Image (cartoon, grey):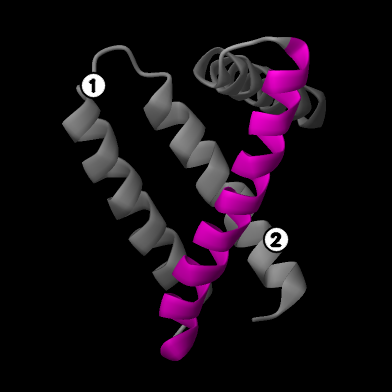
Amino acid sequence: LDETVFREAKYFLDQEVNRILVDPNLSAQEKTSQILQAKEDTAKKYFTGDQISAFGAAADLHDQTVGDSQRQITLALGMELEKYQDAQRQIDISENKLILMRLE
């Protein structure tokens, strides 16, 4: 996979996942379903052929690596992982809104 294209696709996917995960109106099952659909849609938007499944595998590996890092941070800070991840999602969403406002 091209690193630049992967980075852009992963960024796009992460924004979609954040939006889904912070939606209080969705059940856990709905969130899981929508995340899987977002991953598939993103892969098809940015890649073709075998690269579609390669993106899914690379995105999963990236998430596992980041997840391991986040677990270490939360342990060091004495926080719950889920609360840390929710805070990170809110920060990401707020940063994106600020960036978009500056671009207008």
Foreground of the two, 98 or 67: 67
Q: Position of residue 5 (x, y in %)?
A: 68, 70
Q: Which residue is mark 2?
A: 7
The residue sitting at the right extreme is 102
Residue 72 colored magenta?
A: yes
User: Which quadrant of the figure has residue 22?
Assistant: top left
Quadrant of the snapshot with the C terminus: top right
Q: Residues within 10 Å of mark 2 (few under 14, many from 20)?
A: few
Total residue callouts = 2
Q: Which mark is residue 26?
A: 1
What is the x, y in percent for residue 29?
18, 33
Name the image quarter holding residue 8. bottom right
- Going by the numbered disc 2, the residue's amino acid type is Arg
Instruction: Work out whether residue 1 or residue 78 is closer to the camera in this orientation and state it.
Output: 78
User: Where does the magenta region start and end?
Assistant: 49-77
Amino acid at the residue labelled 1: Leu
Which residue shows up at 64% across the image and 10% down it? Answer: 79
Choose between 30 and 4: the one closer to the eye: 30
Q: Is residue 11 magenta?
A: no
Between disc 2 and disc 1, whose residue precedes?
2
- Which numbered circle lies on residue 101? none
Helix, strand or loop at mark 2: helix
Residue under the point 49% across and 83% down: 51
Up-down: is 11 above or below 102? Answer: below
Residue 16 drawn above or below residue 96: below
- Residue 8, compared with residue 98, is above or below; it is below
Neighbour class for label 1 at 10 Å: few (<14), some, many (≥20)? Answer: few
